[in-house]
C-alpha cells in the first residue's frame, strides 16, 4: 500500500519549546492516493487530546489535505505539532 509519513517533534513548535520537551513527537501515516489517515503515533504530554481530531478525521473520511488546510490551529499551542506533521505530507499548493 502506498503511504506517506509525517513526523514532527514537540520541540519544533513554540509550545513544545516553551515546555522544554525534547523527547515527544507526533507521527502520522496516510494513504498516498486516497489521502486518508491510516494511523498515528503520539508520544508525549496531552497525546489523547491531540489524537482526537485525527480520530474524527478517520471516522468521517476527512483527508490529510482538509485537515491540514481547512482547520484553524491556535498559536502558540501544542496542537501546532499535529498541524506541522500534516503539512509535511500535505504541503500547501504552489502559488
Image: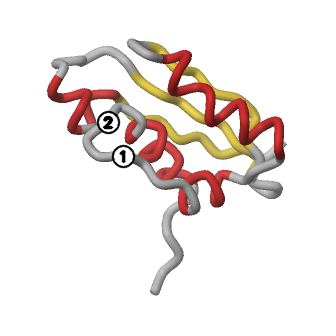
Q: Is residue 3 above or below residue 42?
A: below
Label 2: which secondary element: loop
Q: SS at mark 1?
A: loop
Residue drawn where x is 59% and y is 40% of the image: 5
**Residue 87 or residue 59, whichever sits in front:** 59
Q: Quadrant of the C terminus?
A: bottom left
Q: Position of residue 66 (x, y in %)?
A: 65, 59
* Badge 1: residue crowd in 10 Å (few <14, some 14–19, many ≥20): few
- The image position of residue 72, as x and y in percent, is 47, 54
Q: Quarter holding the N terminus?
A: top right
Q: Residue at x 29, y 46 (%)?
A: 75
Looking at the image, residue 14 sits to the left or right of residue 55; the answer is left
Q: Is residue 31 left or right of residue 28?
A: right
Give me the disc on residue 77.
2
What residue is rendered at 47% in x and 14% in y? Answer: 43
Picture residue at 80% right of the left edge, 57% below the top: 33
Residue 80 percent coordinates (x, y): 38, 41
Crowd rating for badge 2 (residues with CA inside 10 Å; few <14, some 14–19, many 20+): few
In this view, the residue in front, 44 or 28, is 44
Could you tell whether 19 is left or right of 34 in the image? Answer: left
The residue wearing badge 1 is 74
Marks 1 & 2, CB-CB < 8 Å contact:
yes
- In x, y percent, where is residue 54? 65, 35
Q: How is the image coloured?
A: secondary structure
Q: What label does residue 83 carry, if any?
A: none
Tally of numbered discs: 2
Distance between the alpha carbons at the discs numbered 1 and 2: 6 Å
Within the image, what quadrant is residue 71 found in? Answer: bottom right
Q: Quadrant of residue 21?
A: top left
Amino acid at each position: 500500500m502506498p503511504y506517506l509519513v509525517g513526523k514532527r517533534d514537540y520541540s519544533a513548535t513554540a509550545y513544545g519549546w516553551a515546555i522544554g520537551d525534547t523527547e515527544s513527537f507526533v507521527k502520522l501515516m496516510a494513504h498516498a492516493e486516497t489521502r486518508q489517515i491510516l494511523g498515528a503515533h503520539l508520544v508525549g504530554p496531552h497525546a489523547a487530546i491531540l489524537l482526537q481530531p485525527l480520530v474524527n478525521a478517520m471516522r468521517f473520511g476527512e483527508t490529510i489535505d482538509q485537515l491540514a488546510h481547512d482547520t484553524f490551529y491556535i498559536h502558540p499551542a501544542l496542537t501546532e505539532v499535529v498541524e506541522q506533521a500534516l503539512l509535511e505530507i500535505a504541503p500547501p499548493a504552489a502559488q
